[in-house]
Amino acid sequence: MDSAVYAPMLDLKRATLDHQRTYGCGSRPFADGAQLAAWAIQAGACSAVEIGTSLGYSAACLANAGILVQTVDRDPVHIELAQRHLNERGLASRVNCMTGEAVEVLADLPAGEADLAFFDGMEVSVAEIEVLARTLRPGGLLIVSNMDLGGEAAEVRELIGGWQLREDGEVLLAVKPSPAR
């Protein structure tokens, strides 16, 4: 992304960090939205499912790269703020923001249709990664952020142990295998 296109995303990243400091909530932006978009583009993603909307920074970065995003956050205030930020950047038509517990909300999405599944919640859980994996097509890319925040990180690694894996700092990238013939 060139800097002129990416500047509104940096403003959103700063807004998310300011929100976190002001309200002490778990809202935090993905470390590098441009890198997230680059991984998505490299994977050929046209559609994405995200857990952990916060103020919409990651969803905006993906939508700005031309990807249709379905994102869920349990905090209705975060969803409201995300929708406002997406509207301000002309990206609202590319992002469907949903409120609720991710495991319940994403259970209604079709299986095997997403090109990219992205976890950007606080502590990673097996249940959330299972529901993301279900939405992901074979050959699709799973990106799990915040692996260093605890939760069930070891169990998640075990769950997707048969996938093609790579770790990049706190981020786990995994390609969903095709079904055995």
Image (spheres, helix red, strand yellow):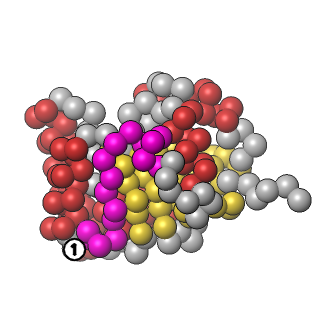
| Position of the C terminus by quadrant | bottom right
Horizontal side of residue 177 vs 129, given as left or right: right
Horizontal side of residue 154 vs 60, given as left or right: right
- Image coords of residue 40 (percent x, y): 50, 64
Identify which residue, 132 or 160, lies in the foreground: 132
- Helix, strand or loop for disc 1: loop
For this orientation, the residue located farthest to the front is 108
Amino acid on which the number 1 mark rests in the picture: Gly
Mark 1 crowdedness (10 Å alpha carbons): few <14, some 14-19, many ≥20: few
Look at the image and give the residue range highlighted in magenta.
91-106
Q: Residue at x 18, y 52 (%)?
A: 80
- Image coords of residue 131 (percent x, y): 55, 45
Is residue 14 part of the magenta span, yes or no? no
For this orientation, the residue located farthest to the left is 22
Identify which residue, 51 or 110, lies in the foreground: 110
Is residue 104 part of the magenta span, yes or no? yes
Q: Residue at x 75, y 43 (%)?
A: 162
| Residue linked to disc 1 | 90
Identify which residue, 91 or 29, lies in the foreground: 91
- Image coords of residue 41 (percent x, y): 50, 69
| Position of the N terminus by quadrant | bottom left
